């Protein structure tokens, strides 16, 4: 990547072997990946696999499931391939080869692969490819290409890579001969990142030019709207709007392009858009895309310009809590976008956001059991909500069961709209690639939580083993396990931290400002010990004055972990809406277990507000005395693992 300041590491150079992320990595391998395969391969649950068997003629039937389910199978394959890289498993490797063979059979001569179309053909129906943008063909092809590249990188097999090249050939045909169809169908655009993956592994410039053609076709599209980020040419975009998965995938793919081309103008656009999300639209937990449904541009004077948006970024500071959408795929897309911006700029703020997402909304989107998933990620859950919030699989038709009561919305082991679970699996199965980067200036360590790193730059090599109880304790120790030369080490001082200290073999080293990398330059020897100490008091945070839904409320954070209160941790006579925090109140860290998972909770004394005396929309405030009650806050990511109930991240503050 010629324009990268920082080069990402692969599994050969960084792993989670221990500690917090070592545990998550093992859970992903042992529980999540097999569990998702169980859902995709069992026709009683889904036709993820079955659709391919019908498309090849091996079985009879019709296509069932959403049109993007092929892509979800490819994403699962990518997660499994990531797992093969860190944990060889011949049976799993054989299954991936078998699937690669099936996919190749479904592929048309021109490279197009899409089981709904193929099955219709097999059944003698009249079908047209790319007839409907909601067929998600480019999304599926993009994920196929990325899985093919990963398969080749990890196993050396070219079976899926060949199919991937065919898929790219079809996309090139669209870009050149059918740009309108391509522009219309380019939703949830995984194919930008995908062809750049293919370019990096083949160094065939046609793929780089193809990514440039995608951008050109999009910018020339005249029928677009904000929901798909194609109302304006990308370079004219000032704020991020519309479907949050589509936005984050698009900008991540364009950042890939800049990493190769060094297009400074496009980089400036991406920095401006990323800052817009980070400064005005990102939930405290790292969630992206606040709205279930809305309109954009919001309040525009020309109504003809306004388009419907869904699963979307709202306007600046619009961050509803109960109705937070924050689709799991959108949050993962923000990790993809941020890691590419980090590679481009070396700015620690991008690693800070990856940390914010990873420890909070990403881990919340999967149960502590490793096999249940959220599609949306609420910031607050309340009883008796007088309207139903859409869940994946809730079709809105009258003959389907009503959604569960609002305080019983919990993770599901399967959802008919299955984009999120395999995305969560691949994000977690490859999370070690976000541990660190290298540059000619040395090693940059971004994420903490149980890694082993072994990198070489020019003639220098450095291997480190991290020992820490992060994120529960801020003492992070690295032991040098191999060294030659004097590779400088740069450790991220998180933006949230204050009073960090750093020592090497007990000698103090200067620490840089929060939100930067502290450099350590010396001749390393095996056994050297680096200790970064990040004090972790519980911190009370509040939102921007324009964030109306956060007005008069605070949230609690300790280290990178955002906390929440759940109704099962309240005294029997206290309701969720009564819980307030007094300014200056103390928080006591206590070790607890939920679902056999160890974590640090925070015990404190809540101020109990008077219960509302009526069901009216408004009522006079009684002058009741406030009382106190003990409450326990738990990490947000662990909410919803003890049965149904209410939950809130933000709580009223009493001065
Ligand atoms: Zn999703």
Image (tube, rainbow, N blue to C red):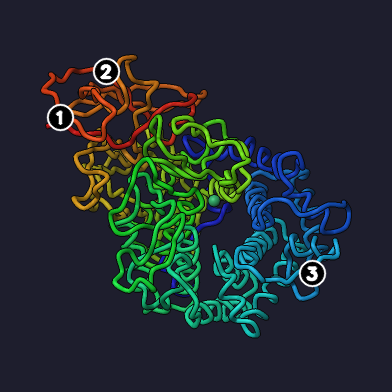
**Res. 445 in view:** no
Residue 188: percent from left, percent from top: 54, 62
The Cα atoms of the two marked residues, 2 and 3, are separated by 66 Å
Report the residue at 49% width, 34% height from top. Answer: 409
Q: Residue tagged by mark 1?
A: 620
* x, y percent for residue 634: 37, 28
Q: Nearer the viewer, residue 222 or 399?
A: 399
Residue at image point 35% right, 54% down: 490
Q: Which mark is residue 95?
A: none
Identify residue for label 2: 630
Residue at the top extreme, as displayed: 572
SS at circle 1: loop
Which residue bears the numbered disc 3?
Answer: 126
Q: Which-is-in-front pick, marks 2 and 3?
A: 3
Evaluate if marks 3 and 1 touch, with contact meaning CB atoms under 8 Å apart: no
Task: Classify mark 1 as within 8 Å of ligand 1 or not, answering yes or no.
Answer: no
Measuring 31% from the left and 69% from the top, which residue is drawn there? 300
Q: Compared to 624, does 107 lie above or below?
A: below
Sequence-earlier tag: 2 or 1: 1
Picture quadrant of residue 97: bottom right
N-terminal of the pair, mark 3 or mark 1, is 3
Write the residue at 18% across / 26% down: 585
Helix, strand or loop under label 3: loop
Q: Position of 554 compared to 17: left or right? A: left
């Amino acid at each position: 990547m010629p324009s990268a300041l920082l080069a990402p590491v692969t599994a050969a150079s960084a792993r989670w072997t221990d500690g917090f992320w070592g545990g998550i990595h093992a859970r992903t391998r042992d529980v999540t990946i097999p569990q998702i395969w169980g859902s995709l391969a069992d026709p009683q649950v889904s036709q993820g696999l079955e659709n391919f068997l019908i498309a090849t003629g091996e079985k009879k039937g019709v296509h069932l499931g959403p049109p993007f389910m092929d892509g979800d199978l490819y994403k699962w394959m990518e997660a499994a391939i990531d797992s093969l890289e860190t944990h060889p498993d011949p049976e799993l490797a054989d299954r991936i080869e078998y699937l690669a063979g099936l996919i190749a059979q479904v592929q048309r001569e021109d490279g197009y692969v899409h089981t709904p179309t193929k099955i219709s053909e097999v059944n003698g129906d009249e079908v047209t490819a790319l007839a409907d943008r909601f067929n998600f063909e480019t999304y599926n092809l993009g994920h196929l290409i990325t899985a093919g590249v990963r398969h080749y990188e990890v196993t050396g097999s070219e079976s899926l890579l060949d199919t991937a090249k065919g898929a790219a050939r079809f996309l090139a045909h669209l870009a050149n001969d059918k740009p309108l169809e391509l522009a219309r169908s380019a939703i949830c655009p995984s194919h930008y990142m995908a062809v750049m993956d293919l370019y990096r592994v083949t160094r065939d410039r046609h793929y780089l030019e193809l990514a440039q053609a995608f951008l050109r076709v999009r910018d020339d599209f005249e029928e677009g709207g904000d929901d798909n980020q194609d109302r304006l040419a990308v370079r004219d975009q000032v704020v991020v709007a519309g479907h949050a998965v589509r936005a984050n995938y698009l900008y991540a793919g364009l950042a890939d392009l800049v990493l190769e081309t060094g297009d400074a103008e496009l980089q400036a656009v991406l920095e401006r858009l990323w800052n817009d999300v980070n400064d005005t639209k990102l939930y405290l937990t790292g969630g992206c895309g606040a709205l279930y449904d809305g309109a954009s541009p919001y309040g525009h004077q020309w109504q003809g310009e306004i388009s419907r948006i869904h699963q979307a970024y709202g306007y600046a500071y619009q961050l509803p809590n109960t109705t937070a959408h924050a689709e799991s795929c959108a949050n993962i897309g923000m990790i993809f976008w941020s890691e590419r911006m980090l590679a481009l700029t070396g700015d620690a703020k991008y690693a800070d956001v990856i940390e914010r997402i990873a420890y909070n909304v990403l881990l919340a989107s999967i149960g502590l059991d490793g096999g249940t998933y959220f599609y949306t990620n609420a910031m607050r859950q309340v009883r008796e909500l007088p309207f139903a919030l859409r869940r994946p699989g809730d079709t809105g038709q009258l003959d389907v069961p009503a959604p569960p009561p609002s305080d019983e919305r919990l993770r599901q082991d399967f959802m008919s709209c299955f984009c999120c679970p395999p995305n969560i699996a691949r994000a977690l199965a490859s999370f070690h690639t976000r541990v660190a980067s290298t540059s000619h200036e040395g090693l940059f360590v971004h994420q903490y939580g149980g890694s082993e790193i072994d990198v070489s730059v020019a003639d220098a090599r450095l291997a480190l083993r991290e020992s820490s109880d992060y994120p529960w304790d801020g003492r992070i120790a690295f032991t040098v396990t191999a060294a030659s030369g004097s590779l400088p080490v740069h450790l991220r001082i998180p933006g949230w931290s204050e009073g960090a200290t750093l020592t090497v073999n007990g000698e103090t080293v200067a620490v840089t400002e929060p939100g930067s990398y502290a450099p350590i330059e010396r001749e390393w020897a095996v056994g050297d010990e680096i200790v970064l100490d990040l004090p972790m008091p519980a911190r009370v945070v509040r939102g921007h004055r324009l964030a109306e839904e956060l007005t008069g409320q605070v949230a609690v954070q300790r280290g990178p972990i955002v906390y929440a209160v759940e109704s099962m941790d309240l005294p029997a006579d206290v309701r969720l809406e009564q819980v307030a925090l007094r300014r200056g109140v103390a928080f006591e860290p206590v070790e607890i277990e939920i679902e056999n998972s160890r974590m640090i909770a925070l015990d404190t004394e809540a101020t109990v507000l008077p219960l509302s005396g009526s069901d009216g929309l408004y009522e006079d405030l009684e002058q009741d005395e406030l009382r106190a009650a003990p409450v326990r806050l738990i990490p947000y990511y662990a909410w919803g693992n003890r049965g149904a109930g209410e939950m809130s991240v933000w709580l009223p503050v009493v001065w």
